[in-house]
Amino acid sequence: MLITHRDIRKVNQQTGTLHDISYCRGMVSEHGEGLAGHHAAYTLGVIDEASGCSPVVWDMFGGWAKHLLVFGNPNECPLTHPFRAAVAKGDIMA
């Protein structure tokens, strides 16, 4: 494994090269641009402080995240906010 400030990457031990699609990336996105373009067979998006994140972040994750793990708190957010709508729906079974 190669661990840097924001990334954890898988390294091929025989060749020393990085795997192109095996990575974990931590990022803060106020506008969602950095969340585009992550495509693989298995993907997981994680949203923390969900009641305060921009709805565009939810849209970006919706384009590629096969699974979504969302953490939030009961802070007020607009009636149309995706987090509020998701809480209102309740548990979703796979």
Image (cartoon, rainbow, N blue to C red):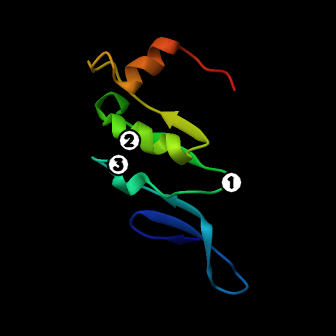
Q: Is residue 46 left or right of residue 44?
A: left
Q: Position of residue 84 (x, y in %)?
A: 38, 19
Pointers 3 and 2 in contact (C-beta within 8 Å): yes
Q: Earlier in the sequence, mark 3 or mark 1?
A: 3
Q: Earlier in the sequence, mark 3 or mark 2?
A: 3
What residue sits 34% from the left and 34% below the top? 55
What residue sits 40% from the left and 25% below the top? 83
Up-down: is 34 above or below 92?
Answer: below
Corner quadrant of residue 59 = top left
For disc 3, the marked residue is 32
Q: Residue type at mark 1: give it.
A: Ala
Q: Position of residue 52 (x, y in %)?
A: 28, 32
Q: Is residue 60 left or right of residue 2?
A: left
For disc 2, the marked residue is 57
Up-down: is 72 above or below 45?
Answer: above
Comparing 34 with 13, the one in front is: 34
Q: Residue type at mark 2: give it.
A: Val
Category of crowding for the residue at label 2, using alpha-carbon neighbours closer than 10 angstroms: few (below 14), some (14–19), many (at least 20): many
For disc 1, the marked residue is 41
Secondary structure of residue under mark 1: loop
What residue sits 41% from the left and 63% below the top? 6
Identify the image quadrant of the C terminus. Answer: top right
Real-space CA distance between mark 3 and mark 1, rounded to the nearest whole angstrom? 21 Å
| Circle count | 3
